[in-house]
Image (cartoon, coloured by chain):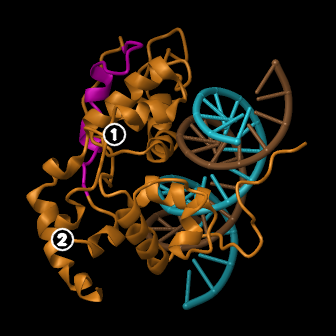
Chain colours: A orange, B cyan, C brown
Amino acid sequence: MGRQPCCDKVGLKKGPWTAEEDEKLITFILTNGQCCWRAVPKLAGLLRCGKSCRLRWTNYLRPDLKRGLLSDDEEQMVIELHSQLGNRWSKIASHLPGRTDNEIKNHWNTHIKKKLRKMGIDPVTHKPLREEPCLHSSPQVPAEQVEGKNTTSISATCSVSPSSSCFSEKAEEIQLPRMEWPESAYLYGLDDLGGWDFTSDHLLLDSFSQCQRAALDQESWKFELF
DNA sequence: AATACTGGCAACCGCGAGAAA
DNA sequence: GTTTCTCGCGGTTGCCAGTAT
């Protein structure tokens, strides 16, 4: 006997979420909390699969999410954790407050993998791709290409550890983190989140910077929607 | 200006683990 | 102990914006 699908897919909407759907989901979860994702779409009035609702919430709508590029520190931590845990993105994400497994996975696949390869490090094993020292002596990857025109030469003893000096040299490429709330979350005042039972001790409200607050103020017109 | 290509990211899919019956 | 169900995870896909030709 096969497993039943997580939901009846007939008549369900797929694809990108609209602001209206986001609003419904946020309203529902802020009111009722997270439980029984299978029932959420029906109760919230959404033509979505429960699984889709959960993903949308955990990856995009959760108010404790950081958004924007990973910081240098976060990126180094991801590399360190990946060397220990492998592709266990949720475990890695649990060490990075405000970051989702999906976000980290995407960042790894689109940015970090390439950086490591350019540096002569195998992103899977975290070991040098070749026996010879990485970067400089690589015939395929000229140092200029690797480090950019403005950087000075890197030590030829690029260690296996991703937290080595090789990485700090790349710091200039990495933008500072830009924390943002998901657009839909702007629909809610911060005070509305009071009493919201986040079990995670990583709740980021405390670290919500003045910058974001200013941004929130700028988005205040959206509050008029309610 | 139009088209092709590429990279980044949100979302989907299928599977496994664990809980509940 | 077995079956059924839900949730969460990791891999993959597809869309879209930006860039190159």
Chain under label 1?
A
Where the C terminus of chain A falls, by quadrant?
bottom left
Q: Which mark is residue A148?
A: 1
Q: Is residue A123 magenta?
A: no
Crowd class of label 1 (few under 14; some 14 to 19; many from 20; radius 10 Å): few
Mark 1 or 2, nearer chain start: 1
Task: Look at the picture and state if A217 lies above or below A225.
Answer: above
Q: Position of residue A150 (x, y in %)?
A: 25, 40
Q: Residue at x 27, y 42 (%)?
A: A71
Magenta region: A158-179
Q: Which structural element holds mark 1?
A: loop
Q: Name which quarter of the figure residue A157 lies in.
A: top left
Q: Nearer the viewer, residue A69 or A182?
A: A182
Q: Which subunit holds the residue at mark 2? A: A
Q: Position of residue A213 (x, y in %)?
A: 13, 65
Instruction: Looking at the picture, tell me which residue is in the foreground, B6 or A103.
Output: A103
User: Is A177 colored magenta in this rendering?
Assistant: yes
Q: Which residue is mark 2?
A: A216
Q: Position of residue A29 (x, y in %)?
A: 41, 63
Q: Amino acid at mark 1?
A: Gly
Q: Which residue corresponds to the image point at 57% horizontal and 74% vertical from the top-left?
A: A46
Q: Three-letter amino acid code at disc 2?
A: Leu
Q: Secondary structure at mark 2?
A: helix
Please indicate whether residue C1 sits to the left or right of residue A33 in the image: right
